[in-house]
Image (spheres, rainbow, N blue to C red):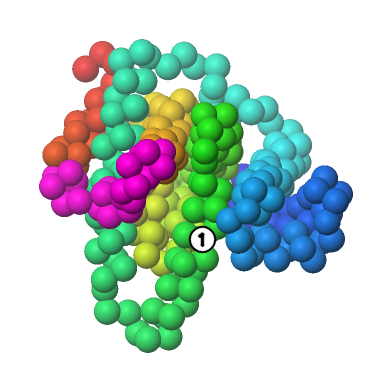
Amino acid sequence: MNLWGLSILLIFILIFQLVGFFLSKIILAAAFNISTDQVAELMSRPNGTALSINIGRFSNLINFLCYMGVPSVLFLLINRISINEIGHYNKKPLLLKIGWSVLLGISAIPVISVLTKWTSQLPFPESVEGIAKKLSNMRNVLFENMLDMNHISELLFCIVLIALIPAILEEFIFRGIILKIGLLQYKKALTAFLFQGFVFAIIHLSLYELPGIFLMGSIFGYLAFKNSHLWYNTITHFIFNGVTVFLYYYVSQEFKRSGIHYNVDEILANFLFAIPASIIMGLSIFNLTKQENE
């Protein structure tokens, strides 16, 4: 439960990213009766086929469980502590605050989208800009492949894959383990919030999204600290990701119905939406962090 332990945790995350990648190739090659090279090709360069979409989704699932799930379990076993000692899930969330968590998750979407759009327009050095665009394009291709949904069953699967599992595991690691280490190591709680928010942003490997992810990570840390459990930030995280997945599904269905294609990112990155959303976002944070007797 110190910075050395955190370093080991981050090393485990990197190691199990590699383990997840190779495990994905082996499992999916056997499942779909193709070679591991074909799996790797479809994982990195999806072609829009049903096989490519399924490989994209299941490889993401295997990878995420490996590099977020396994290090979490190892950390608990090595430190001989329970899940509740980190997440305090035995504390009962309040219904009213659950409502504010939902509002925070929804209102944060246009605010973070505008922030990401502004960041992408900053004058970065040419070498940095090239790397940032490459990473952004790669992420967009992979996510659009996974979010190519035709049926409600695919929507539900993508919500579990992209919203529910990340909300649970990322909150447990970053707002549970890493925030707890930060609070033990730093005198000021604010330093701990910013520290885990920075680690959260860096690990997503996206320069354009870094300020937005850092902001949300810091807010999640503040919520966890003020409430002494992970329920509200996990719910907010789930709603944030889940609503985004649903919007992709809705736009896809609308395109098939009317032939009109809407750009989800452009719709969300609307300054007119972001202004009232930022007010709702602030009210939600205030109500989620005030004490019950206030």
In this rendering, position of residue 270 left or right of residue 260: left
Q: Is residue 272 visible?
A: yes
Q: Is residue 240 visible?
A: no
Image quadrant in which you'd find residue 99: top left
Image height of 237 relative to 63, above or below: above
Q: Position of residue 184 (x, y in %)?
A: 51, 44
Question: Is 124 included in the stretch rendered in magenta?
Answer: no
Q: Inspect the image, locate mark 1, and give the three-letter code of the amino acid beneath it.
A: Val
Q: Position of residue 221 (x, y in %)?
A: 41, 41
For the point 24% across and 64% down, which residue is it?
118
For the point 52% across and 29% down, which residue is it?
152
Q: Magenta region's main secondary structure?
A: helix
Check disc 1 and report the residue beneath it. Answer: 141
Check the picture and name the quadrant holding the N terminus: top right
Image height of 206 relative to 292, above or below: below
Crowding around mark 1 (Cα neighbors within 10 Å: few <14, some 14 to 19, many 20+) is some
Residue projecting furthest to the bottom: 126
For the point 26% across and 37% down, which residue is it?
107
Image quadrant in which you'd find residue 253: top left
For the point 26% across and 73% down, which residue is it?
122
Image height of 290 relative to 33, above or below: above
In the image, which residues are magenta? 253-275
Residue in front for this viewpoint, 223 or 186: 223
Q: Position of residue 270 (x, y in %)?
A: 20, 51
